[in-house]
Image (tube, helix red, strand yellow):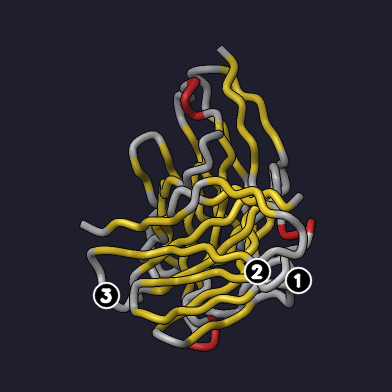
Amino acid sequence: SQTIHQWPATLVQPVGSPLSLECTVEGTSNPNLYWYRQAAGRGLQLLFYSVGIGQISSEVPQNLSASRPQDRQFILSSKKLLLSDSGFYLCAWSAGAMNTEAFFGQGTRLTVV
Amino acid sequence: AQKITQTQPGMFVQEKEAVTLDCTYDTSDPSYGLFWYKQPSSGEMIFLIYQGSYDQQNATEGRYSLNFQKARKSANLVISASQLGDSAMYFCAMREGHEAAGNKLTFGGGTRVLVKP
């Protein structure tokens, strides 16, 4: 069966420090991968998605970047965190068919101080 | 422009009663899929139900049903016989079928449901 791992669960980082959040998927190949951010009590904002290795689409201009160095690995990064980067980050994967749901990781709660 | 709109930020519902959560969407693509997710306070995202744009019948999954009105571009979620465990945020999402959409899954702002005993 397929599983998705996302870590760490919580993270407190100072302003100006770098960030690296990792997400890996097991049990499937060539998944679509997504990074979302959720502000407290709000909806999910799509940050990046990827349909293949090295293929990254960015949805909003921001202080973050994403990479997909391997088929089932998706990394969210920042060189210098801002206070506004605080939030709940969710990684997700889905199969290629339109009618397939996305499966989410447990999320990372990032607080920039 | 917003692709997915959920106009109800929060709702109270009495235990054992039904509740309808509104979702409207905007697309010119004839091929699309609509999803509903539940997010309890733990933060996990739980898939509830799916409706395809070409599906002739409304989707149902246990106590969840989707009231799909294609001409009005609405896909409301109905939860029957509410339980205390239904208290959560609920999100509507859409995936468009055209190639340029790239399998994006776009979410609405969510509706918080609180079930009262």
Mark count:
3
Please give the label number shown on residue B26: 2
Check contact, mark 1 vs mark 2: CB within 8 A: yes
The residue to which callout 3 is attached is: A29
Q: Which SS class for mark 2?
A: loop
Please give the label number shown on residue B1: 1
Type of residue at label 1?
Ala
Is A28 placed left or right of A39 in the picture? left
Residue A60 position by quadrant: bottom right
Quick check: do tags 1 and 2 share a chain?
Answer: yes
Residue A100 position by quadrant: bottom left
- Percent x, y for residue B112? 64, 36
Q: Which residue is depicted at the point 51% across and 36% down?
A: B42
Label 3 marks a residue whose chain is: A
Q: Quadrant of the N terminus of chain A?
A: bottom left
Type of residue at label 3?
Ser
The CA span between labels 1 and 2 is: 9 Å
The CA span between labels 3 and 1 is: 33 Å
Q: Which SS class for mark 1?
A: loop
Which mark is in front, 1 or 2? 1
Q: Nearer the viewer, residue B108 or A40?
A: A40
Check contact, mark 3 vs mark 1: CB within 8 A: no
Q: Is residue B89 visible?
A: yes
The CA span between labels 2 and 3 is: 31 Å
